[in-house]
Amino acid sequence: MLDLALENCSINQNIVNIGVKDGKIASISKSPLKADKKINIKGKIILPGLIDAHVHFREPGYEYKEDFRTGSMAAAHGGFTTILDMPNTKPETNTAKEFKKKIKIASKKSIVDFGLHASINKIKEIEKIIPLKPASFKIFTEKIENHKISLIFQTLKGSKIPVTFHCEDPEIIEYYTSQLKDETRPEIYSLARPSIAEELAIAKAITFSHHYNHPTHICHVSSKKALKLIRSVRAPVTCEITPHHLLLRSKDLKKWGTITKTNPPLRPEKEAINFKDLKMIDIIATDHAPHTLQEKENNIWDAPPGIPNLEVTLKLLLTLTRKKRLKLARIQKMLSEKPASIFGLKNKGRIKIGMDADFVVIDPKKTGKIKTDEFYSKAHYTPFEGREYIGEPIMTILRGELIMEYGEISKNKGAHIKSKYTKE
Ligand SMILES: NC(=O)N[C@@H](CC(=O)O)C(=O)O
Ligand SMILES: [Zn+2]
Ligand SMILES: [Zn+2]
């Protein structure tokens, strides 16, 4: 007997019933299924559970901003069933000891499945972290010398674990920031970290990827020129865009102030990435980067960069599908299929027999306005506040268990998802 049957699902223009057993997709059939629990999906949209390759749940060390419990509840609320957490915690996730500690914390507190990106301080730690199957090794180009990046790539030879980059050139940022230091208008932040700083750092990342022929992923690409640069070379490079770099512009810094401060910064319309450029981008990732409202309301130079997005991203994208700016199939590809393949999440990202029974059920007609008082995240602010949306995730199902239903979150237990990309 099946544990769960999702009935009347519209998958690739067919109406089918999806059978779930022991957390896996056991059958997809046109005939009725016998199951302990049945959910009728008629009139709704069902997608593979979304995967967010780029979140900051701030634990350990910055739990006052977010933690694995609140961050993962926000993920479930937004239709995400798997997240990949970033290593810029305190202490950083750059040793096998810290990596194991974070697995323990997340295994206790996360209600969605999780993978972890690692960062690197001592090169010799890489060999100890690889067996723990990290989603990637993360490099901030602002903080590391070139020779050290080459040692990281050399050490990763023979492994397919990607290197992910935050690409901004520190010398350019330092110069333009020094020229603008007396400015207080938030919108100058885009000038302090100009697109050329990102392009220059991307050129470096691509060179390493090409030279070592190693899979490399560029985080939060913010400008069209940066994107064209990535696509102009033959190298195993993938990239991501955030909802804010797709939908907001540097003028929103003027309107929303430091709430929209993020690295890399929002770009002016003439430099920014538009919907038609999405075909050049592999995935959408939220870069969910919560801070306290008090921290964010500081001046443009002292407010921390980062925007929380887990609970608004799917609503914003669904609304774009209604406005014919985006196809649902692209959402599925950029938020489920591709993140799973880039980061080696073996049983995730597709509705196919044998895969984890991870789904998001959407009511395409449900309308509303983005309201931060409904957020599970500790960060109750967003530059999308008040924006009207059409289409809302109403159920999130993780390995056959309902973890969100009409905005209510259940206390479920997420599992550590290990990358399949270890030694070849
Ligand atoms: N994106 C941001 O502006 N901030 C991120 C760090 C990062 O992803 O660069 C954060 O951790 O707050
Ligand atoms: Zn970053
Ligand atoms: Zn980030």
Image: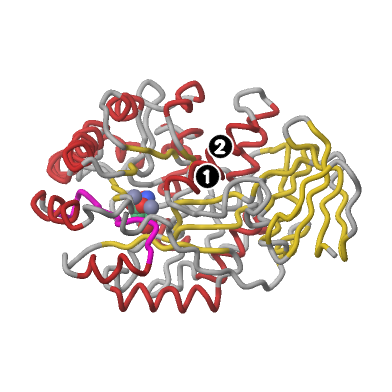
Q: Is mark 2 within 8 Å of ligand 3?
A: no
Decide whether residue 111 is among the magenta residues.
no
Using the image, tell me which numbered label, if any, was put on residue 209: none
Q: Is residue 28 left or right of residue 326?
A: right
Front residue of 132 and 380: 132
Q: Is residue 29 left or right of residue 137?
A: right
User: Which corner quadrant holds the C terminus?
Assistant: bottom left
Q: Is residue 37 left or right of residue 27?
A: right
Q: Which residue is mark 2?
A: 333
Q: Earlier in the sequence, mark 1 or mark 2?
A: 2
User: Which corner quadrant holds the N terminus?
Assistant: bottom right
Front residue of 394 and 152: 152
- Give the residues in magenta: 133-144
Type of the residue with mark 2: Lys
Residue drawn 51% across the image and 54% down it: 346
Image coordinates for residue 52, horizontal then vertical, percent: 51, 51
Residue drawn 91% across the image and 48% down it: 32
Would you identify the image quadrant in which residue 257 lies?
A: top left
Element marked by disc 1? loop
Image coordinates for residue 213, horizontal then vertical, percent: 23, 40
Type of the residue with mark 1: Pro
Image coordinates for residue 183, horizontal then vertical, percent: 25, 41
Q: Which residue is mark 1?
A: 383
